[in-house]
């Protein structure tokens, strides 16, 4: 994968992660909605205004470009030239560099970032959905406490599901890139 494509995706990931973080801050406030106060209506309305502000400032989380992931069965064994750093395929480098160098990223790193990016977008969409509901829905008279409790439960559930599971951020790089002086092993 080209380093430029990876950099674009990394920038989009950072933007979505920032948006998800700002949405999560309000979801955390929702998780504490009405807790300990008798004024459920006032707390609800204050948080409604806050949710509307955040939604106005935070645009919809969408990729800025199409994400293309090559299926694993289309991968090829390649070599990395020690002299120029160029990726060589279908055979090892001859030691004569005739092309311009390009910056590349391992496909496994790209696939890992795509998965993290998609998970971040999903999380941001879930948070945004809850904020939209809070921002534009008002309970009937006398139902403020019940509405606060329902929103509080949903927010707690979302925050729990948004926590990364242990080991989910493992380094998943696969086999190292072979240097051109090395021959691939059988079956590699």
Image (cartoon, rainbow, N blue to C red):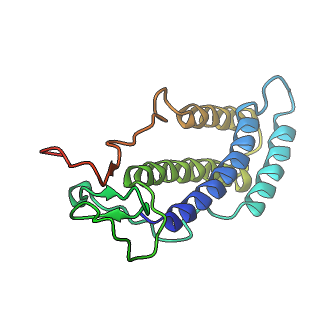
Residue 25 location (% of width, % of height):
74, 41
Q: Is residue 27 above or below residue 50?
A: above
Q: Residue at x 73, y 53 (%)?
A: 135
Q: Residue furthest top?
A: 36
Left or right of 135, for residue 168? left
Residue located at (62% from left, 55% from top): 16
Instruction: State which quadrant residue 185 falls in.
Output: top left
- Please name whichever residue, 7 or 53, is drawn nearer the observer in this view of the structure: 7
- Classify residue 9 by image quadrant: bottom right
Q: Position of residue 188 (x, y in %)?
A: 19, 46
Question: x, y (%) of residue 64?
Answer: 56, 70
- Furthest residue to the left? 186
Question: Where's residue 1, x and y in %?
Answer: 41, 63
Q: Is residue 172 left or right of residue 181?
A: right
| Residue at (66, 38) in percent of width and height | 151
Q: Say if residue 84 shows up in the picture.
A: yes
- The residue sitting at the front extreme is 95
Location of residue 91 with respect to 169 vertically, above or below: below
Instruction: Look at the picture and state if 73 lies above or below 175.
Output: below
Examine the rendering and report whether any part of residue 139 can be seen. no
Along the viewing direction, whichever of 67 and 29 lies nearer the viewer? 67
Q: Is residue 171 left or right of residue 145?
A: left
For the image, the number of numbered tags is 0
The residue nearer to you, when weighing 128 against 86, is 86
| Residue at 47%, 69% in the rendered image | 102
Horizontal side of 125 relative to 15 (left or right) equals: left
Q: Could you say which is closer to the camera, residue 2 or residue 41?
A: 2
Q: Quadrant of residue 58?
A: bottom right
């Amino acid at each position: 994968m080209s380093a430029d494509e990876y950099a674009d995706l990394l920038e989009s990931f950072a933007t979505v992660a920032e948006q998800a973080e700002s949405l999560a801050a309000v979801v955390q406030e929702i998780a504490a909605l009405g807790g300990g106060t008798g004024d459920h209506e006032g707390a609800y309305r204050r948080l409604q205004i806050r949710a509307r502000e955040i939604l106005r400032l935070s645009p919809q989380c969408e990729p800025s470009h199409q994400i293309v992931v090559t299926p694993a069965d289309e991968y090829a064994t390649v070599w990395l030239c020690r002299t120029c750093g160029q990726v060589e395929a279908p055979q090892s480098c001859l030691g004569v560099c005739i092309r311009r160098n390009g910056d590349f990223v391992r496909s496994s790193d790209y696939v890992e970032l795509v998965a993290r990016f998609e998970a971040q977008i999903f999380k941001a969409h879930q948070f945004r959905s809850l904020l939209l509901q809070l921002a534009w829905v008002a309970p009937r008279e006398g139902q403020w406490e019940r509405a606060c409790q329902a929103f509080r439960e949903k927010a707690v559930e979302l925050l729990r599901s948004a926590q990364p599971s242990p080991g989910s951020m493992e380094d998943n790089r696969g086999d190292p890139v072979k240097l051109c002086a090395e021959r691939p092993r059988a079956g590699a």
